[in-house]
Image (tube, rainbow, N blue to C red):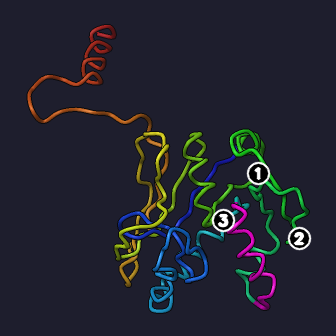
């Protein structure tokens, strides 16, 4: 069994659209493309963060738009260890097109729910997203995400495509690692934490979870 990791750069208000440049994704009239670029130039620690993430065994899970952006850029970067990693790793691409994918080690998948569930049942490295907002929304809708690593940048964008959109299945998360770079980017990793538990501060009435816990204790005692 292998895991699905959503790795995303996001603003403080959860926007992940077009962090790398104005032309990356202007859909919806988004005007802030490239919002993360200056942080990368000013914060050398971010390179170490990415080195740690990509230093672990992984395969990529990409939407077609992100794939096309990557495929037009990374094969032409020479003497770059990060480029070598992206060029040689296996890439699963969610696409409706049936034409061959030309970037080396690229495999088309057409049914997110079934194909990725099948891949998760296989042995192999972690399946890691990059960009690919629509793919992430499909993964969340079908409860296929096991881990999140979110690079939260110290800015608010107000509008744009968000990591957690409509259709996300409610769930609790467990924080397993967190660090903050000198430039103020918070890097947090979360894993599944079970169901969302509710309660109240309004009165002393115990929650359903607490009542169930007390009942279990009675039976066991």
Tell me the distance, in whole angstroms, between the alpha carbons under discs 1 and 3. 12 Å
Q: Along the polypeptide, which appears first: circle 1 or circle 3?
A: 3
Determine the residue positioned at 84% across, 63% down: 106
Mark 1, mark 2: which one is toward the viewer? 2
Q: Is residue 114 above or below residue 133?
A: above
Determine the residue positioned at 8% across, 28% down: 203
Location of the N terminus by quadrant is top right
The residue under label 2 is 102
The residue under label 3 is 56
The residue under label 1 is 124
Q: Nearer the viewer, residue 69 or 126?
A: 69
Q: Residue 67 occupies which quadrant of the picture?
A: bottom right
Determine the residue positioned at 63% across, 54% down: 135
Mark 2 is surrounded, within 10 Å at the Cα level, by few (under 14), some (14 to 19) or many (20 or more) other residues, namely few
Magenta stretch contains residue 112:
no
Q: Is residue 188 left or right of residue 135?
A: left
Q: Is residue 49 left or right of residue 4?
A: left
Residue 199: x and y, percent? 22, 32
Tell me the distance, in whole angstroms, between the alpha carbons under discs 1 and 2. 23 Å
Prevailing secondary structure of the magenta residues: helix
Where disc 3 sits, the SS reads loop
Q: Is residue 76 above or below residue 49?
A: below
Location of the C terminus by quadrant is top left
Residue 35: x and y, percent? 46, 81
In magenta, the rendered stretch is 62-79
Tell me the distance, in whole angstroms, between the alpha carbons under discs 2 and 3. 25 Å
């Amino acid at each position: 069994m292998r895991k699905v990791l959503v790795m995303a750069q996001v603003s403080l208000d959860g926007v992940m659209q077009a962090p790398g440049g104005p032309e990356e994704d202007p859909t919806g009239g988004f005007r802030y493309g490239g919002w993360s670029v200056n942080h990368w130039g000013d914060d050398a620690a971010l390179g170490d963060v990415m080195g740690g993430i990509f230093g672990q065994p992984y395969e990529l899970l990409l939407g077609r738009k992100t794939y096309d952006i990557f495929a037009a850029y990374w094969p032409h970067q020479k003497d770059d260890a990060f480029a070598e990693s992206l060029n040689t790793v296996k890439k699963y691409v969610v696409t409706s097109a049936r034409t061959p994918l030309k970037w080396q080690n690229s495999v088309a998948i057409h049914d997110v729910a079934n194909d990725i569930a099948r891949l998760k049942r296989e042995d192999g490295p972690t399946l890691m997203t990059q960009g690919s907002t629509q793919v992430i929304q499909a993964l969340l809708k079908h409860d296929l995400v096991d881990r999140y690593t979110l690079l939260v940048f110290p800015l608010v964008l107000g509008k744009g495509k968000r990591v957690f959109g409509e259709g996300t299945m409610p769930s609790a998360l467990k924080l397993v690692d967190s660090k903050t770079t000198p430039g103020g980017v918070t890097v947090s990793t979360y894993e599944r934490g079970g169901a969302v538990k509710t309660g109240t501060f309004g009165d002393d009435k115990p929650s359903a979870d607490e009542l169930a816990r007390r009942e279990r204790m009675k039976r066991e005692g």
